[in-house]
């Protein structure tokens, strides 16, 4: 089983601060996805990164896939209270038939 | 707006009951999945299906079964509910090659077994 470790597990910051969340594995993935989940709801896909070294930006969110395709980071600039939620990364294995692996998540709280 | 709809948001069942959780997607997705989510354990895959009438075991299939008679519907069955199956159950679907297309999740069913 391929494992994904997310850090930190919990993060509490003030509005306007910057933050970075990490997703690490010893396994190589063909792609990696980031999701945000709000309480009582299902996760919502934010981005898919496919190429090693790829950087994608979604407004104030910047996603990076490691060169070796084993790790990824999510950076949020000038966090807002609406960014509060559980952030999950999911690694997709080399074949479509393989099972995706989810990290345990980072719970982010942005205080006003 | 594309959707994955789970039939119940909250469900309370008694130990030993047979429980059906229904999931319907309107996106013509080939792939459908059932996960459970528990604090400290993350999302764990129960069963998945790549086509109608086809099913594959996930990481924790014991105590569960599934049915996919139509492309848009994927049902999870708890054969005899037990208290350790109290959890948030999430259904998801995806289109084609999952390397490029992520999951669309439903809103979840919070099941309590008493």
Image (cartoon, rainbow, N blue to C red):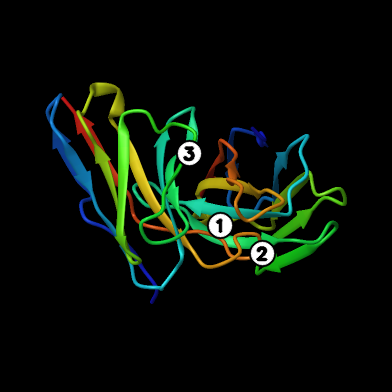
Q: Secondary structure at mark 2?
A: loop
**Which is nearer the eye, B64 or A43?**
B64
The part of the image, by quadrant, that contains residue B77 is top left
Q: Which residue is mark 2?
A: A60
The correct choice, above or below, for B14 with respect to B67 in the image is above
Give coordinates of residue B97: x percent, y percent. Answer: 61, 64
| B100 left or right, relative to B76 | right
User: Which residue is located at x 20 percent, y 45 percent?
Assistant: B20
Q: Which residue is mark 1?
A: A80
Quadrant that contains the N terminus of chain A: top right
Q: Which residue is mark 3?
A: B58
| B56 left or right, relative to B107 | right
User: Which residue is located at x 56 percent, y 47 percent?
Assistant: A87
Q: Counting other residues with Cα less than 10 Å from the Cα at mark 2, is it few (<14), some (14-19), or many (20 or more)?
A: few
User: Which residue is located at x 68 percent, y 48 percent?
Assistant: A93
Q: Are marks 2 and 1 on the same chain?
A: yes
User: Which residue is located at x 72 percent, y 51 percent?
Assistant: A94
The correct choice, above or below, for A36 with respect to A108 in the image is below
Alpha carbons under labels 3 and 2: distance apart: 35 Å
Dots 2, 1 in contact, CB < 8 A: yes
Give coordinates of residue A40: x percent, y percent. Answer: 34, 47
- Of the numbered discs 2 and 1, the one sitting upstream in the chain is 2
The part of the image, by quadrant, that contains residue B51 is bottom left
Q: Counting other residues with Cα less than 10 Å from the Cα at mark 3, is it few (<14), some (14-19), or many (20 or more)?
A: some
């Amino acid at each position: 089983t391929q494992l994904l470790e997310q850090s930190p597990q919990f993060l509490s910051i003030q509005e306007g601060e910057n933050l970075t969340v990490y997703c690490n594995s010893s396994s190589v993935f063909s792609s990696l996805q980031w999701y945000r989940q709000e309480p009582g709801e299902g996760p919502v896909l934010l981005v898919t990164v496919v190429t090693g070294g790829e950087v994608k930006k979604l407004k104030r969110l910047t996603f990076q896939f490691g060169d070796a395709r084993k790790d990824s980071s999510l950076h949020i600039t000038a966090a807002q209270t609406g960014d509060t939620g559980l952030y999950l990364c999911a690694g997709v294995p080399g074949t479509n038939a393989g099972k995706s692996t989810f990290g345990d998540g980072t719970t982010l709280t942005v205080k006003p | 707006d594309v959707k994955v709809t789970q039939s119940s948001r909250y469900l309370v069942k008694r130990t030993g009951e047979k429980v059906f959780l229904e999931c319907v997607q309107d996106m013509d997705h080939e792939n459908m999945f059932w996960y459970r989510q528990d604090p400290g354990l993350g999302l764990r895959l129960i069963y998945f299906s790549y086509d109608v009438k086809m099913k594959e075991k996930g990481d924790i299939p014991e105590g569960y079964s599934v049915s996919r008679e139509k492309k848009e519907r994927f049902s999870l069955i708890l054969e005899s509910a037990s208290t350790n199956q109290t959890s948030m159950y999430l259904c998801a679907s995806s289109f084609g090659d999952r390397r490029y297309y992520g999951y669309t999740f439903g809103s979840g069913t919070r099941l309590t077994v008493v």
